Image (cartoon, rainbow, N blue to C red):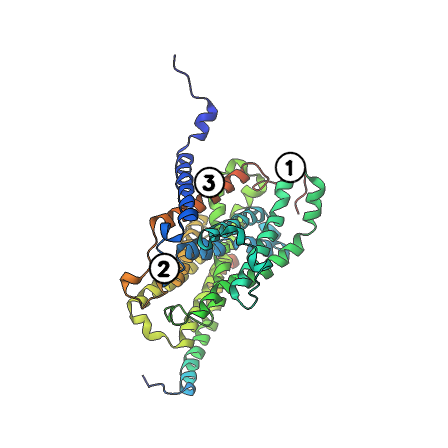
Amino acid sequence: METIHTLQEFMLHTKNIIYILMVLALLGMPAFWRFLNGRDED
Amino acid sequence: MTQEPTPTTSRYLTPFNVVAGIVVVVGLIITVLRFTGGLSTVTHLSDDNPWGIWIGFDLLVGVALAAGGYVTSAAVYIFGMKRFHAAVRPAILTGFLGYALVVLALHYDVGRPWRLPYPFLVSQGTTSLLFEVAACVALYLTVLFIEFSPAAMEWLGLKRARGLVVRLTLLLTIFGVMLSTLHQSSLGALFLIAPAKLHPLWYSSYIPIYFFITSIIAGLSMVIFESGLSHKFFKDKMDEEHLAGKNVVMLGFGKAAAWVLAGYFFIKVIGIAADNQWHYLATGYGAWYLVELLGFVALPAFMYAVGVREKNTTIIRWTAAWTVLGIVVNRFNICLVAFNWYLPSDQRYFPHWMEIGISVFIVTIGVLAFRFIVTRMPILYAHPDYEAH
């Protein structure tokens, strides 16, 4: 893992990961919603 | 000639009453010791560990679990989900008793009960979060008392007064939601002052948001949990609406709890990423954090969803109990386990048995008060002389 020296590097590193997690959340939450309501639609 | 015990005597001498009686007597003795001998007589609190289970359990868990009142009344009166109406009065009663007992428990921790109004009347620390928490709890306890009062007024036959209070329902609900949003999050914000004392995995600048979201989860789960117990022990007190509404409440609240838990799971993971605390997950504290996150957040989210999909109220009921336990674990972790985490074990806090005794005493008072009220007042049934509001 690259070493973090500055606030800029810290923000860049953490924001990169958060953006990836947000994509996962945006995919995961609708999938969970469909699982939750799956039987209602049948 | 031996005399047969009267039905009244045998009715009162139940195992529950005997155990509750012993707990109350022991609690009263510890109460006398606490208020005559001071904190050191009955607690292991110290300058390093000034907040024990009276704050971690009685206050933080108590306030979170009493959130069912604002969650249910908001769902019914603000969002118009009238199908959950049967759950309103039990939820308001649970909330009212919960907050009343939080205030009672606080007396044990701070002492000098006659000084309770001081923060409002004598020395207003308006820049303190504790002032805001105190003000909100005092106001919200009053709101809950007024929201609960129609049931007592129906019982006492005070028709005019009941009519006046019922007209305030929407106003009180909005006020209750505002106050709950404020103080549920502020209880978490109290820990913002101690970033060096709280373990980095539990400390976050988002902790007020975590506390607020978990209060919604606690409220939803507590209504399901309490509803399950009421249907078991007070079924004879319920009318058709309450009996028929059991599954509607469990499935509806279970679905909401699953959704909020899933959102909370993602927010927590993003919180770890925002503070770049991943490396702590490989430590002992990290393992315990994962138990909380996976075992008490992700697992109940999935189990609630399975229960709702299968329309299985048994799964939902057990998941609610598990989630309530998860709230206890979360608040204990923040207030006790992860607090002062760097101190050597001999300087860490472990509660005195009398502290646990007072917490059990206070919970017992709550259960006895709940039973006293639901067996007398129209909480689990609609009074035939009054229209539902």
C-alpha distance separating marks 1 and 3: 27 Å
Q: Which mark is residue B232?
A: 3
Q: Are marks 1 and 3 in contact (CB under 8 Å)?
A: no
Circle 1 residue = B156
A40, above or below B149, in the image: below
Query: Which three-letter amino acid code belongs to the residue tagged 1?
Result: Leu
Is residue B39 found left or right of B209 in the rendered image?
A: left
C-alpha distance separating marks 1 and 2: 47 Å
Q: Are marks 2 and 3 in contact (CB under 8 Å)?
A: no
- The residue at the point 71 percent across, 47 percent down is B164
Q: Nearer the viewer, residue B255 or B101?
A: B101
Q: Nearer the viewer, residue B231 or B305?
A: B231
Badge 2 and badge 3 in a common chain = yes
Element type at mark 2: loop
B191, above or below B96, in the image: below
Dot placed on the residue nearer the N-terminal end, 2 or 3: 2
Badge 1 and badge 2 in a common chain = yes
- Is residue B377 visible to us here? yes
Circle 2 residue = B46
Query: Which three-letter amino acid code belongs to the residue tagged 3?
Result: Lys
